[in-house]
Image (tube, helix red, strand yellow):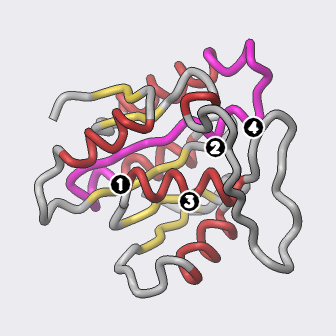
């Protein structure tokens, strides 16, 4: 499979539909600043699943607009270097949330995960999981949203076969 950089949700969904049934899909949401833990997650994904999709959109919550392009390119380079199959890296939040966006998801009794200039993390994660439809999610201890992924998988995708793999600072390949 040729490495692809996907810039819109439509491109992500179209890519997902090119994957033949029966192939296992892994989803790797990269953290704020791609690092060794992210590289481990990518290596583990490559060994574990048939197709690896990386998301770098969440970098927007941590980066000023002028830094986003630099951070995204570093993440794209890391994903390509570790043989990911596709990277979802939209250039602008309007590609994710066109026009007026009224749907908002939140986890009861959890801290508010809203960020300036960004919708809440729960809504973004549901959109990403819906677009990637992964069999396995590869998270790192540095991912601020690990707990959110776990709660959403438990609550929304309870009867699915989605697995979660987590890497910590002490994890070895």
Q: Which mark is residue 45?
A: 1
First-in-chain label (2 vs 3)? 2
Label 2 – label 4 distance at C-alpha: 10 Å
**Is residue 136 rendered to the left or right of residue 92?**
left
Q: Position of residue 40 (x, y in %)?
A: 47, 49
Crowding at dot 2, Cα within 10 Å, few <14 / some 14-19 / many 20+, comes out as many
Q: Residue at x 50, y 30 (%)?
A: 89
Q: Which residues are magenta?
A: 44-69
* Closer mark to the observer between disc 1 and disc 4: 4
Residue 63 vs residue 15, the one in the foreground:
15
Label 1 – label 4 distance at C-alpha: 24 Å
Which image quarter: residue 33? top right
Q: Secondary structure at mark 2?
A: loop
Find disc 3 in the rendering and name its residue.
Answer: 126
Q: Secondary structure at mark 4?
A: helix
Q: Residue at x 64, y 76 (%)?
A: 151
* Closer mark to the observer between disc 2 and disc 3: 3
Q: Residue at x 58, y 82 (%)?
A: 155
First-in-chain label (2 vs 4)? 2
Residue 92 vs residue 74, the one in the foreground:
92
Q: Are marks 2 and 4 in contact (CB under 8 Å)?
A: no
Find disc 4 in the rendering and name its residue.
Answer: 61
Label 2 – label 3 distance at C-alpha: 17 Å
First-in-chain label (1 vs 2)? 2
First-in-chain label (1 vs 3)? 1
First-in-chain label (4 vs 3)? 4
Find disc 2 in the rendering and name its residue.
Answer: 31
């Amino acid at each position: 499979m040729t490495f692809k950089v996907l810039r819109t949700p439509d491109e992500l969904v179209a890519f997902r539909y090119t994957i033949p049934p029966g192939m296992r899909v892994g989803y790797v949401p990269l953290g704020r600043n791609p690092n060794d833990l992210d590289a481990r997650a990518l290596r583990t994904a490559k060994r574990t699943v048939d197709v690896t999709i990386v998301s770098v959109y969440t970098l927007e919550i941590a980066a000023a607009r002028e830094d986003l392009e630099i951070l995204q390119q570093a993440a794209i380079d890391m994903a390509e270097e570790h043989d990911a199959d596709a990277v979802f890296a939209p250039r602008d939040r309007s590609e994710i949330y066109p026009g007026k966006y009224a749907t908002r998801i939140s986890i009861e009794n959890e801290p508010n995960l809203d960020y300036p200039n960004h919708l809440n993390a729960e809504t973004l994660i549901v959109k990403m999981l819906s677009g990637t439809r992964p069999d396995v999610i590869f998270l790192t201890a540095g991912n601020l949203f690990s707990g959110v992924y776990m709660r959403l998988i438990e609550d929304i995708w309870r009867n699915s076969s989605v697995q979660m793999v987590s890497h910590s600072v002490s994890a070895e390949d």
